[in-house]
Amino acid sequence: MRLLLVEDHERFAEFVKNGLEREGFTVDAVTTAANADAAFAAVSYDTVILDLGLPDADGLTLLKAWRDQGNSTPVLILTARDGVDDRVKGLNSGGDDYLLKPFEMQELIARIRALLRRPGGTLGTVIEVGNIAFDTSAREVRIQNKAITISRREMGVLEHLMRRAGRVVPKDVIEDKIYGFDEEVSSNSVEVHVSRLRKRLTASHADCAVHTIRGVGYLLAVDEENNGLV
Ligand code: CA
């Protein structure tokens, strides 16, 4: 899951970013409305965490512009302004939830997960493909009902392949979802994660396999030999 954090207080942003990354999210942090708008246009985020008081514009103006463009990405508003007016304005401008500062990290994480699980979205809590079950809330992967050990990046790759099981997922889409702007990405890193993931799936007797579609990307499909079709 890739999140955009828009917060101009740099130390606070760093604290929130670290907390979210520990929970397995990929986070891009920006400090101005202009950078937020540019990032939002470039990446399809799963959720945006938006501070209202930004140096170059009001967060609500930004949010309203995104909603006017027809974008429905969940937005969680962070605000220090303790007033009913601001909350109502925030929700009227297209915010999905809000959190008053200061807040506990656990509270923020719970709110984000709730947004990601909302009915109407395509995001369920547990995704299942073949004998693999991916709990997107607990960040746990089970194969044949046994939890497996898996790195954060491999988990990111698996999640996106599972969400689009049976369809080809372009390599750059996977790369986009598992790396933030500030992370170095070597040209073969997705291949490396896919290769490790394959080994893990085989070792745990998964009945699905990751297929390489040369020059395009990857596809996760249930193995026909294992499911009785052949
Ligand atoms: Ca601020």
Image (cartoon, grey):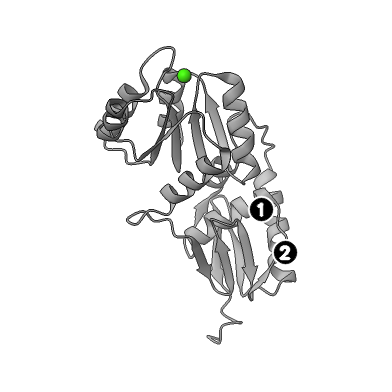
Residue 59, image x and y in percent?
Answer: 37, 23
Q: Can residue 63 be seen in this view?
A: yes
Task: Say what amino acid the circle numbered 2 marks.
Answer: Arg
Q: Which of 198 and 47 is in front in this view?
A: 47
Q: Is mark 1 on a helix, strand or loop?
A: helix
- Identify the residue shown where x is 35% and y is 18%: 58
Q: Quadrant of the C terminus?
A: bottom right
Q: Quadrant of residue 50?
A: top left
- Image-based side of 70 in relation to 211, left or right: left
Task: Tell me the amino acid under the disc marked 1.
Answer: Glu
Circle 2/circle 1 CB separation < 8 Å: yes
> Which numbered circle lies on residue 154?
1
Q: Is residue 69 visible?
A: no
- Between residue 84 and residue 122, name the one nearer to us: 84
Q: Residue drawn at (62%, 40%), measured in percent from left and top?
A: 21
Residue marked by disc 2: 200
